[in-house]
Image (spheres, rainbow, N blue to C red):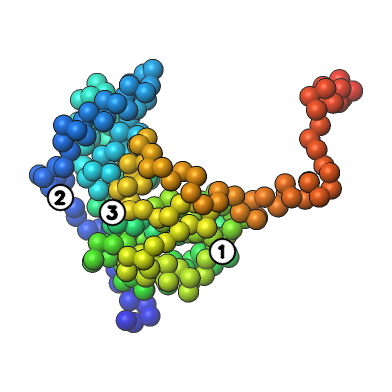
Amino acid sequence: MAENSHQNHATATDKPVPYSSGDSKITDATIAEMREIMARYPQAQSALLPMLHLVQSVEGRVTPEGLEICADLLGLTGAEVSAVATFYTMYKRRPVGDYHVGVCTNTLCAVMGGDLIFDRLKQHLDVGNDETTEDGKITLEHLECNAACDYAPVMMVNWEFFDDMTPETATKLVDDLREGNEVKSPRGATVCTWREAERVLAGFPDGRADEGPTGGKATLAGLRLARERNWTAPGQQSRTDQTQKED
């Protein structure tokens, strides 16, 4: 493959996707789960975000049918639901592969190698930004800040962290995903499919919340230092006394 072949890709927004495929997979069981989500909130309209995640878990994207069902159940217009779905980048209007691979290209990750990783993956997978491989396995997207600067450059697979990445470890990661190998996040759970992850985000746990470590060395460095030096936070009374002195 030519080194700069990815530069010839049109962006995903240049490629039309049918407004509706006409074969919605939303069933009565899905609608019952939407009502279950609604019942969790004092105001039913607060359930819209997890309901959209549930739509994605079933449809593989936010479909027109999914939008309209959410609108009908919540007493909203289709335009109001669409405004929400198009505002948040986690909601996709185009089909997503089995694994959504996000590469942080914000300032620190970019400086530390995020741009190089993203370019390597575009070449390796032969896709552009927000495009899916022909086998339907990987959707690649550059992300803005994963809130994990202490592990830069960072990637995410279906919202699980992968830290201190390089172009080489990134290509191995996507190869393992495409080959069906088990992949575990260094600070989270074993990677599931994107649709399975979307169901979890809709509020239906899969029992893996406590699988694997949740904090790494960089995140806990300050805590370790405080313990080594016997540092403690001032008590409430000390803070009150200090405030009174400053007054």
The residue tagged 1 is 164
Q: Position of residue 186 (x, y in %)?
A: 52, 58
Frontmost residue, 166 versus 114:
166
Distance between mark 2 and mark 3 Cα atoms: 14 Å
Q: Position of residue 179 (x, y in %)?
A: 32, 69
Q: Position of residue 1 (x, y in %)?
A: 32, 81
Disc number placed over residue 96 in the picture, else none: 3
Q: Position of residue 62 (x, y in %)?
A: 25, 42
- The answer to whether residue 236 shows anywhere in this view is yes
Q: Residue at point 11% right, 45% down?
A: 23
With respect to residue 31, does 216 lie above or below?
below
Q: Residue at point 37% right, 70% down?
A: 175
User: Quick one: label 2 or label 3, which is nearer the N terminus?
Assistant: 2
Q: In which quadrant will I find the C terminus?
A: top right
User: Quick one: label 2 or label 1, which is nearer the N terminus?
Assistant: 2
In the image, what residue type sits under mark 1? Asp
Distance between mark 3 and mark 1 Cα atoms: 25 Å
Image quadrant where residue 129 sits: bottom left
Image quadrant where residue 70 sits: top left
Mark 2 or mark 3, whichever is nearer to me? 3
Disc number placed over residue 18 in the picture, else none: 2
Q: Residue at point 52% right, 70% down?
A: 166
Whether residue 12 sits left or right of residue 236 in the image: it is left
Near mark 3 (Cα within 10 A), the count class, few <14, some 14-19 or many ≥20, is many
Disc number placed over residue 189 in the picture, else none: none
